[in-house]
């Protein structure tokens, strides 16, 4: 495996704390990355066999209901470290909300009002969560990312205010 994609790198990074099942990785990713890097269950379960086949992970203990632990190998640690030290590449924002806003002109005025109103409510909640995360951050790296997340949530709210509803 020459180049890790961001999802693979995220999984390798999470596995530095110890073996985890796919379900545990999904939960850990949501807890650790939820505000800025979404990882879906299907992405996790698609990447795990690829990483195992590449020798970056090995199978660990089998758990309840046939759950399978994955363990980071020495090669996986090296691949992750290499990914961390590589150039960042492009950052792609995949936001269903922004995609909807791009096409909001195809909605009726009432539908746009509903879209903006519901998105505003959701993002105000996200902003409150992001502010709490920023206050709770203990490392300078986590704090910087948390502050960025606050700024991002504010930017989305500013974007929502710029969309005409009439």
Image (spheres, grey):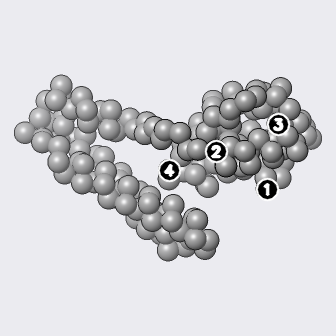
Distance, label 1 to label 3, CA atoms, is 15 Å
Position of residue 160 measured from the top left corner of the image (x, y, whole percent): 23, 48
Q: Nearer the viewer, mark 2 or mark 4?
A: 2
- Judge from the rendering whether residue 132 lies leftward or rightward of residue 105; answer left or right: right
Distance, label 3 to label 2, CA atoms, is 18 Å
Q: Earlier in the sequence, mark 4 or mark 1?
A: 1
Q: Which of the 4 image quarters holds residue 104?
A: top left
**Residue contact between numbered discs 3 and 2, judged by CB atoms under 8 Å:** no
* Residue situated in front as seen by the camera: 55 or 58: 55
- Judge from the rendering whether residue 102 lies leftward or rightward of residue 165; answer left or right: right
Please give the residue where the numbered disc 3 appears in the rendered image.
Answer: 56
The disc placed on residue 17 is: 1
What is the tally of numbered marks visible in this picture?
A: 4
Q: Secondary structure at mark 4?
A: loop
Please give the residue where the numbered disc 2 appears in the rendered image.
Answer: 86
Q: Nearer the viewer, mark 4 or mark 3?
A: 3
């Amino acid at each position: 495996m020459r180049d890790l994609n961001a999802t693979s790198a995220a999984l390798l990074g999470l596995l530095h704390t110890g073996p985890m099942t796919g379900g545990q990785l999904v939960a850990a990713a949501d807890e650790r990355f939820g505000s800025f890097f979404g990882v879906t269950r299907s992405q996790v379960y698609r990447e795990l066999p690829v990483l195992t086949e590449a020798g970056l992970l090995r199978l660990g203990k089998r758990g309840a209901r046939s759950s399978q632990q994955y363990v980071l190998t020495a090669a996986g640690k090296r691949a992750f470290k290499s990914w961390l030290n590589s150039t960042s590449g492009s950052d792609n924002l995949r936001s269903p909300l922004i995609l909807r806003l791009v096409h909001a002109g195809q909605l009726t005025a009432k539908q746009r009002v509903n879209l903006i109103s519901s998105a505003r409510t959701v993002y105000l909640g996200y902003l409150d969560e992001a502010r709490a995360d920023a206050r709770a951050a203990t490392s300078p790296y986590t704090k910087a990312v948390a502050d960025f997340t606050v700024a991002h949530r504010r930017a989305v709210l500013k974007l929502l205010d710029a969309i005409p509803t009439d």
